[in-house]
Amino acid sequence: MDRLTIAERETALPPLGETGWGPVPDRDAIRKVWKFRSFSEAWGFMSRAALAAEKANHHPEWTNRFNIVDVTLTTHDCEGLSTLDIDLARRMDRLAGPAEVIRDHAEPISCLCQIRREGTKA
């Protein structure tokens, strides 16, 4: 598997950027964070995405905290972005449905359980 060429990047990355995928500092990778309405919705998305990733033999780096799913895509075989990442990103976008996209990756993201807990303190 080869890294994306400059031309492939210029074609593929801007549309992904419009959906919320962004560059990862100091890595040739892309990242997106989704906020689902519940843990069940987040888990359902991860299950569907895991099946798609397994079928493609390309696996994301991801974390899940209650209703938040944070995904980073890169291809370890070529140490950077490849067509596998672009294809999986597009597939994950379709699988996520109407989940909220967190575009500001610099700010801490509160999961639903934290928001509920803070609401009960007031």
Image (cartoon, rainbow, N blue to C red):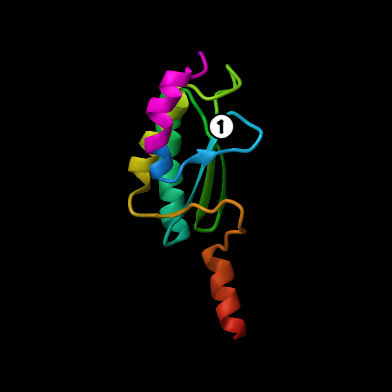
Q: Is residue 4 magenta-colored?
A: yes
Q: Which residues are magenta?
A: 2-15
Front residue of 34 and 57? 34
> x, y percentage for residue 17?
43, 40
Is 31 on the left-hand or right-hand side of 12? right
Is 102 on the left-hand or right-hand side of 97? right
Q: Is residue 88 above or below residue 100?
A: above
As drawn, which residue projects farthest toward the top?
1
- What secondary structure is the magenta-colored segment mainly? helix
Q: Residue at x 63, y 31 (%)?
A: 27
Q: Residue at x 63, y 38 (%)?
A: 25
Q: For the residue marked with disc 1, what is the amino acid?
A: Ala
Q: Is residue 22 above or below residue 80?
A: below
Is 83 on the left-hand or right-hand side of 73? left
The residue tagged 1 is 29
Q: Residue at x 55, y 67 (%)?
A: 113
> Badge 1: few (under 14), some or many (20 or more) residues near its Cα, within 10 Å?
some
Image quarter hosting the C terminus: bottom right
Q: Is residue 89 magenta-colored?
A: no
